[in-house]
Amino acid sequence: MSKKNKLNEVAVIPLGGMGEIGKNMMVVEVGEELLIIDAGVMFPEDELLGIDLVIPDFTYIKENVDRVKGILLTHGHEDHIGALPYLLRDVNVPVYGTRLTLGLLEGKLKEHHMLKGARLKVVNPGSSVKVGDIKVDFIRVNHSIADTCALAIHTPLGPIIYASDFKFDQTPIDGEVADFHKLAELGDSKQGVLALFSDSTNVEREGYTLSEMVVGNTIEEIFQNAKNRIILATFASNIHRIQQVINSAFRYNRKIALTGRSMINNIDIARNLGYLTIPDDMIINIRDCSHYPDNQIVLLTTGSQGEPMAALTRMARGDHYHINIRQGDTVILSASAIPGNERLIGETINQLYKRGAEVIYEDVSGVHVSGHASQEELKLMLNLVKPKYFVPIHGEYRHLTKHAALAREVGIPEENILIAELGDRIIFTEKKIKKAGSVQAGSVFVDGLGVGDVGNIVLRDRRLLSEDGIIIVVLTIDNRGKILSGPDIVTRGFVYIRESEELIAEATALLEEKLKECEENRVKEWSILKNQIRDTLSDYIYKKIKRNPMILPIIMQV
């Protein structure tokens, strides 16, 4: 339990999304009340072998569960809502978000059999709610998913604005322009904005981020020229992009088939909530594609990131259940690469070309625009809200540093800008911003149904197994330490035994000699025997073939 916050102090603690891209999560403490903003996941990088998801460490929240008044959601992307099924097991408080955000969350909670007990509260963009004693404004901004909001959390020292992921799109697909007026009103208010926490993802890009409308024009042009099937992969949550594909398909008299679980689920949710308009007769079952000419088919699919088991990747490999790529198909990858996925996407593009498809992707055309603000929009946000203090968020350390430099350019004093790390307790007073200690924070790994049961030691073992394999030595002894059978050597992922019989025979003879020595010296303790086996074998293997496999001695006593 932390020290009680004084009324003239406000604390903010990032538990995710700081110095990293993904698993965004923030805690705001006003007096004795605690609010949580978002709870997202991060997808594992290659070295996290076998890990399915990475979520924030909830230890601090569990320790202060009685103080938590609510969870505020900015939008429905996985890196902002994906960890909620794991958080709500321990912290069942009201969850506030817009209709689409909560619609996507409902689908997630249903999968985890948690929907029944959840307290979901719909908030319309432009309105305010009282969470405990704290007033929170939901302020519309633009992003690559509909219904995205920045938050203004009203504290005794003034509002804290959490800008979330955003951009300023002057021609949004749904006609809902960002609420410049509300942001400027907060900036010009008598009390002024205490602090701004703002998205740094695109801080390295100069100028402005292009409007989503630009993609619509490119898609329209592709539909006009495509002579056979069109297969388009995008993020399943990008409802506006999907709507533009539907509009072009309607214009050119094409039917739409869906593949990929998240694509089917998200379109179903968005249609039911009124965020997507699709004539009923346009959607066909993927199994019925063969009943139509190729120039009347559009396939909407997941797999824009080259994920091994996603629908597009399987089509490219030739092992999809219903659709495989063939000569003359037009394949559109309408998404940018999430950092770390470039190699997988490159492999998928190569396979698509090998199968005779024409591939259109971000590097060679305008089939994607970012959902994040570039430099000029980031400056505009700073100038609209005129914050006293500024903390860059949502980015690696270089992004945060560059965003801090932008803030200095628009006149925020150096001493009023703070670059934080995960777990830092950021304290705001009327006179200064400072770090005051830290709380437990970091990453928790989800593997199957296990949450947090895989740590660095298990990952180290998995890495070792993947690099050098394993040798298992089986030995049977009696209660006096006399060897009854063995040692028998079994290997996996180390060497092909039939081609390395001499190596295994030498290793076995060496172990027999060492174990005989132990027997003569009346060594009966298993731990000593196991160490002798490991040391003898590892030295021999390294000298012979310069490898370090995992050595697992198994001793059975009869």
Image (spheres, rainbow, N blue to C red):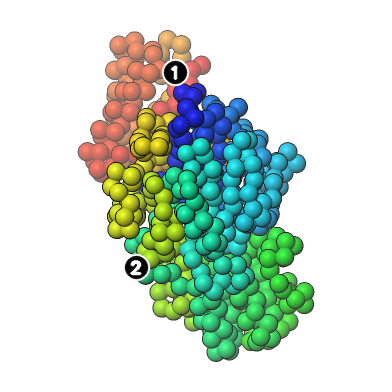
The reply to whether residue 194 is in sight is yes
Q: In the rendered structure, which amino acid carries the disc numbered 1?
A: Ile
The reply to whether residue 466 is in sight is no
Measure how far apart labels 2 and 1 are at the Cα level: 71 Å
Number of other residues with Cα within 10 Å of mark 2, as a class: few under 14, some 14 to 19, many 20 or more:
few
300 above or below 83? below
SS at mark 2?
A: loop
Q: What's the mark number on residue 488?
A: none
Q: Does residue 81 appear to the left or right of 335 in the view shown?
A: right
- Whole-percent x, y for residue 180 in the image: 52, 62
Which residue is at 25% across, 44% downward?
A: 545
> Residue pushed farthest left?
543
- Whole-percent x, y for residue 273 in the image: 72, 61
Q: In the rendered structure, which amino acid carries the disc numbered 2?
A: Glu
Q: What's the mark number on residue 477?
A: 1
User: Which one is nearer the viewer's eye here, 178 or 180?
Assistant: 180
SS at mark 1?
A: strand
Q: Does residue 132 appear to the left or right of 56 in the view shown?
A: right
- Whole-percent x, y for residue 274 in the image: 72, 65
Residue at label 2?
206
170 above or below 58? below
